[in-house]
Each structure stands twice: as structure tokens, then as C-alpha cells.
Image (cartoon, rainbow, N blue to C red):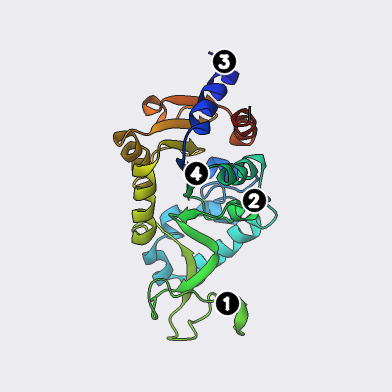
Amino acid sequence: MTLAAFIDQAARHLRISTRVAVLTGAGVSKESGVPTFRDALDGLWSQYDPTALATPQAFNANPKLVWDFYEFRRTLMRPARPNAGHEALAAMEQRIADFTLITQNVDDLHEQAGSHNIIRLHGRINANRCSANCLGSPTLIDVESFEWNREQGPPGCPHCGQPVRPDVVWFDEVLPLAALDAAKIAATQAQVMLIIGTSGLVSPAADLPRYAKHEGALLIEINPEPSALTDHVDIWLQGASGEVLPRLLAAMAT
């Protein structure tokens, strides 16, 4: 079958589905020019192992180093804008009664595109929280609301004085339980699950399609290259999400 035929097949299932879950990974954001975590380990940062820049232990040992790396990543991400894939997912949400977008990405491109029902598994890089979560988990801190010396690294929490850190999930940390539970519910209740731009290698996010499949969902993958999940899906739409998703959305309307 051709890609067009597979798209038509996928669209037929989506047209009659009222409960759809979507899992997006780094490939979706990369199409908007957002470098992956490892892509950001370039230039001055190429000398560092990822575990020296993205673990609680690294932050405790050298808060300024970790903070500076995340400020660098934020600078790289700032020019990015939603691509046609982000926009197609936002439009799809308007057509499907129960539509949940689960993302592993830490940018806010899905929100910029107009998606609303979003579950964030790995946090949001543009948000910050107290490293001690002194007022509950998470204790979000607006670092623009008070003065602090930006040359010395992260500010102290205005409530307890502990360093403020990016509100992202690092290596050796568990995912936010509320987000993970909500993602599992969405996956197990879905009639169709779209898996887009993810390698399928990182658990527990990679387990969500398996939960969905176990409960009878149809799995549709959109990826330019095979992933660890491709052999388990029902329909593989081979291509970039920014190209395939608009075609899928158009096919749903016919």
C-alpha cells in the first residue's frame, strides 16, 4: 500500500473514534528547529556527559553549571514556532470529543499551536520551581517577579532560600505521578492512539502504547524511520509529522 492509502485507512478509524490519545516525542519539536537534549550538547557543552548536566546530583553539586546549561537550551528554543504537525493536532482536538495529547517534550509548542488538553510527562523548560518544593510539589517560582544576580547562577527560592531549578524531569527522577496516572487512563480508554516522533525507547512513556493496545486500541505511528514500537502498531505512516498530520487531518474531512 502507498502512504496515501495508509493515511486514508488511518483517517477512517479516526473519523469514527470519540476517544483518541496522542503521544508526541522529540521528533515533533525537532521539525520546528528545537534541538534535542543531546543535540544541545554542542560547542562549550560538548565536553560534558549528560549526567553532569541533568540529574539532581549534578544540580546539588554545581547549581550554576546546570542552570547555565538550561538557560542555553532556553535560548536555543526561543525562536521555535509550531509547525504544521502541531497545528494539525490542535485542529484534530476540535473534531474529536475526547482527545488527550500526552507529550514528552518540554517546550510549549503544542500550547502555542492551540492544543488544550495536554499532559506533560517531562515538565516544561520555561517554568521553574523550588528545588525543595517547600510549598508542595511542584512549588513553581516566577523568577521574573523579583531581583536576583543572574551572573551567580539560579536564584534562591523566595519562600525557603533553596536554589530554584528548571521544572523538568531529570535523569534519575520519577515522572510526576499525577501526569503519569492521567496518561495511563487516557491510553487505556482510547479507541485510537497516535504515536508521533518518539523513539519508543524511554519508559514509562514507551509503555503507554502497550497499555492502549492491551485494552483494544488501534495504534497509528507517524515517524520517518522505524522505532522500537513500529512492529507493534497497526498502521505506520512513514514520514515527518509536519507533512503527514496535515494530510491525515484533511483525509478525516473527506
Report the amino acid beneath label 1: Val
Residue 190 position in % (x across, y down): 40, 41
The quadrant where residue 89 appears: top right
SS of the residue under disc 2: helix
Most foreground residue, 230 or 84: 84
Residue behind mark 1:
143
Residue 244 position in % (x across, y down): 61, 30
Disc 3 crowd, CA 10 A, few/some/many (<14, 14-19, 20+): few
Answer left or right for 84 relative to 166. Answer: right
Picture residue at 41% right of the left edge, 25% below the top: 234
Report the amino acid beneath label 3: Thr
Residue behind mark 3:
2
SS of the residue under disc 4: loop
Mark 4 touches mark 3? (CB < 8 Å)? no
Q: CA distance from mark 4 to mark 1?
A: 28 Å
Mark 4 or mark 1, which has the lower sequence index?
A: 4
Q: Which mark is residue 113?
A: 2
Mark yes or no: residue 228 visible: no
Residue behind mark 4:
25
Mark 2 or mark 1, which has the lower sequence index?
A: 2
Q: CA distance from mark 3 to mark 2?
A: 29 Å
Report the amino acid beneath label 2: Ala
SS of the residue under disc 1: helix
Mark 3 touches mark 2? (CB < 8 Å)? no
Nearer to us of marks 3 and 1 is: 3
Q: CA distance from mark 4 to mark 3?
A: 25 Å
